[in-house]
Amino acid sequence: MSQNLLLLSNSALFGRGYLEHALGAIAEFLGDERIVHFAPFALADHTGYTARVQATLASLGVSVVGLHAEQDARRAVQAAAVLFVGGGNSFRLVKALQQRGLLETVRRRVGEGGLRYLGSSAGTNMACPTLRTTNDMPIVQPASFEAFGLLPFQINPHYVDPEQNSTHMGETREQRIQEFLEENDVPVLGLREGAWLRQRGPVLRLEGDTGARLFRRGVDPRELEPDTDLSWLLDVPVRFDRPD
């Protein structure tokens, strides 16, 4: 496996600028590459979103190509070296990617090692098999919840720990993940803001400052500290739609 992934829980961290908390990780991920193709489809303003990414990555000497401005987005991805899929609404994002025929192209090129993949929030959701562990409201109707499937397990970005003294009567994030596990025997990584996953070939590590929680069917959630090796998750058997 030659995949090269950087999957951020979030692009904005309280008190810091856009992507500021992860710029060091992005620089390491990019290496010598100085052109990034950007998928801005999770937000409505594609041009403004692309300009924001360009303004941030300019500090690394990077030029950003917005896929929304390409006549043939699939051909552009086939020729790209780096793809950044930004955050926003996951359902709007996957619908746009489906309409442009990008799911299989990205999946194949990343799997072959020819395309580096950077995701943030909804873009990190897209690296999973499905969108079933997103936090977003389904504001549009995609053809399916199928995502890129670059990883075999699920991620919940922006993971928030339960507040012991909260008076909020809605479900906690943990409860929602446990509901997913009632229907699917698939690990879910609750990725806190300020944390990210870095895959270099067969090695997958949890990086950043805030850690994560790992949820699996039938066992208590497991706390994961930064710099934990999670390569074993790449080989864990998964079973979707198996409530038994």
Image: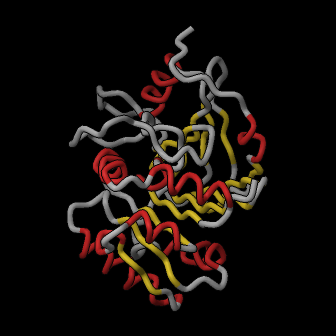
Q: Quadrant of the C terminus?
A: top right
Residue 226's x, y, as percent?
69, 55
At 41% from the left and 52% from the top, the residue drawn is 122
Residue 195 visible within the image: yes
Residue 66's x, y, as percent?
35, 74
Q: Which residue appears farthest toward the top when viewing the image? A: 244
At 50% from the left and 50% from the top, the residue drawn is 104
Task: Give the quadrant of residue 75.
Answer: bottom left
At 74% from the left and 59% from the top, the residue drawn is 2
Residue 62's x, y, as percent?
50, 86
At 49% from the left and 40% from the top, the residue drawn is 161
Task: Give the quadrant of residue 39.
Answer: bottom left
Q: Is residue 158 above or below residue 21?
A: above
Q: Is residue 171 above or below residue 48?
A: above
Task: Give the quadrant of residue 5.
Answer: bottom right
Q: How is the image coloured?
A: secondary structure
Foreground residue, 158 or 233?
233
Foreground residue, 168 or 94?
94
Residue 163 visible within the image: no
Relative horizontal placement of residue 168, taking residue 179 as reference (left or right) = left
Residue 86's x, y, as percent?
40, 63
Relative horizontal placement of residue 238, taking residue 17 as reference (left or right) = right
Relative horizontal placement of residue 85, taking residue 167 as reference (left or right) = right
Circle count: 0
Relative horizontal placement of residue 20, taking residue 135 as reference (left or right) = right
